[in-house]
């Protein structure tokens, strides 16, 4: 027994040491990326594309008075790829998945909104299917956003199930605006050449060679349901903020390379996403503290920081997830309504919810993902 306790203690100590090393490498890579700003023209140009897309999307969303301009702005950012053709394909996959998810959420809302257990099971299953699809299907992004959108529709209709149809329509319009603005930006500013479609192993061997991908999706589903349960247990009243948190967690699944990531690789990826969230949120809160009332300067701040986020995402120091989550959370925290925010407190609430959700995801994922030896046993079986 003493040997077991000692072995456990050494394992815990090693985890803390590895966490400290991971923090040091992440922050070092972040500062190196900032020091590299302006040194690589292709990287800078992609940052300009991202900034223009997000500012254009936000402006159109404000003019159209969309109820969730933050989701449109995020769609304008996340639809971009390194080429125009890639951006169009990604945008269409995102839009088609959103339409399917809005319809699914509206239909399922007739039953799930009145049964919390069934709702949790649906969220877990939807997350599992979306995460598995990203790994095995050439149209995995559409599957993922079907899961995300259906979950958003359900969660944002919890207080009033009669609004499910309106929420479904609003989410579709938000994404359509973001994707359209991203396509326009890509057409004008990006190189346009055909790309071969991505290869994927397909769905046929889920119980064989793709079984690790299934386990990966199951762990991700458990993580998302845990976030929902914890949020409910602490009795936080704002269902809209809970929906935002769940959406961010689902939009940043811990995609495994071939479905066979070990705890170390998952720790690195999830920690990068968490740190990107933390850094992006802190920058957003600093900007909100300035209480900028000018629409022009507010949009300029959004565009400038998004440019930095894309620079980090496209960087060469091994922290692309930090850049993605940095821009993602910054935009969600900064864009709250149809005008520059008048108070920092809504941003604080949203930042706390997102950070907490991603923190729960990271902890649960590390508890459920296998180590090297467990992975070998998994693959043998």
Image (cartoon, rainbow, N blue to C red):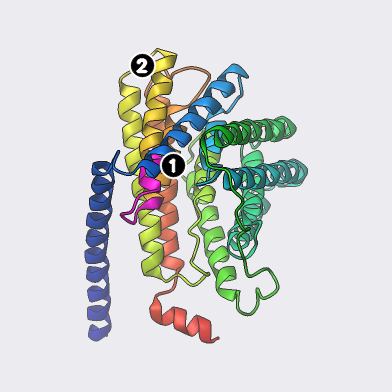
Q: What stretch is highlighted in magenta?
A: 309-320
Q: Residue 92: percent from the left, percent from the top? A: 66, 44
Q: In this view, does 210 lie above or below 292?
A: below
User: Which residue lies at the image location 66% right of the left edge and 39% below the top edge?
Assistant: 153
**Disc number for residue 292:** 2
Quadrant of the snapshot with the N terminus: bottom left
What is the quadrant of residue 261 in the picture?
Answer: bottom left
Q: Is residue 133 visible?
A: yes
Q: Which of 22 and 163 is in front in this view?
A: 22
Q: Is mark 2 on a helix, strand or loop?
A: loop
The residue pinned by badge 1 equals: 354
Q: Does the magenta stretch include residue 315?
A: yes
* Mark 2 nearby-residue class (10 Å; few <14, some 14–19, many ≥20): some
Q: How far apart are marks 1 and 2 (CA)?
A: 23 Å
Q: Nearer the viewer, residue 325 or 367?
A: 325
Q: Does the magenta stretch include residue 173?
A: no
Q: Is residue 188 above or below residue 104?
A: above
User: Which residue lies at the image location 63% right of the left edge and 47% below the top edge?
Assistant: 89
Q: Are marks 1 and 2 in contact (CB under 8 Å)?
A: no
Of the numbered discs 1 and 2, the one sitting upstream in the chain is 2
**Is 20 situated left or right of 373 in this image?**
left
**Is 161 situated left or right of 303 in this image?**
right
* Mark 1 nearby-residue class (10 Å; few <14, some 14–19, many ≥20): many
User: Which residue lies at the image location 63% right of the left edge and 33% below the top edge?
Assistant: 180
Q: Is residue 355 visible?
A: no
């Amino acid at each position: 027994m003493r040997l077991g306790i000692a072995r456990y203690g050494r394992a815990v100590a090693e985890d803390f040491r590895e966490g400290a090393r991971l923090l040091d490498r992440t922050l070092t890579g972040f500062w190196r990326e900032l020091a590299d700003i302006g040194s690589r023209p292709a990287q800078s140009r992609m940052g300009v594309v991202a900034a223009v897309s997000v500012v254009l999307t936000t402006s159109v969303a404000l003019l159209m008075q969309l109820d969730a301009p933050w989701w449109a702005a995020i769609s304008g950012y996340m639809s971009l790829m390194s080429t125009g053709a890639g951006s169009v394909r990604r945008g269409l996959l995102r839009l088609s998945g959103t339409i399917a998810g809005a319809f699914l959420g509206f239909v399922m809302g007739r039953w799930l909104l009145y049964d919390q257990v069934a709702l949790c099971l649906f969220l877990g299953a939807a997350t599992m299917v979306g995460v598995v699809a990203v790994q095995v299907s050439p149209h995995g992004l559409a599957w993922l956003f079907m899961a995300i959108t259906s979950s958003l529709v359900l969660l944002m209709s919890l207080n009033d199930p009669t609004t499910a149809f309106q929420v479904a329509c609003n989410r579709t319009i938000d994404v359509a605006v973001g994707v359209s603005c991203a396509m326009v930006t890509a057409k004008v500013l990006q190189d346009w050449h055909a790309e071969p479609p991505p290869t994927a192993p397909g769905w046929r061997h889920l119980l064989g060679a793709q079984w690790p991908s299934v386990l990966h999706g199951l762990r991700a589903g458990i993580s998302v349901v845990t976030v929902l349960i914890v949020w409910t247990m602490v009795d936080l009243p704002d269902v809209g903020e809970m929906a935002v948190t769940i959406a961010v967690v689902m939009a940043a699944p811990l995609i495994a390379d071939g479905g066979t990531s070990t705890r170390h690789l998952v720790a690195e990826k999830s920690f990068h996403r968490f740190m990107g969230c933390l850094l992006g949120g802190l920058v957003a809160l600093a900007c909100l503290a300035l209480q900028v009332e000018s629409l022009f300067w507010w949009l300029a701040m959004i565009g400038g920081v998004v440019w930095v986020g894309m620079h980090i995402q496209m960087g060469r120091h091994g922290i692309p997830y930090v850049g993605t989550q940095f821009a993602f959370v910054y935009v969600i925290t900064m864009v709250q309504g149809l005008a520059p925010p008048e108070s920092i407190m809504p941003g604080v609430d949203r930042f706390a919810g997102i950070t907490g959700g991603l923190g729960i995801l990271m902890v649960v994922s590390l508890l459920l993902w296998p180590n090297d030896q467990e992975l070998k046993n998994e693959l043998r079986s």
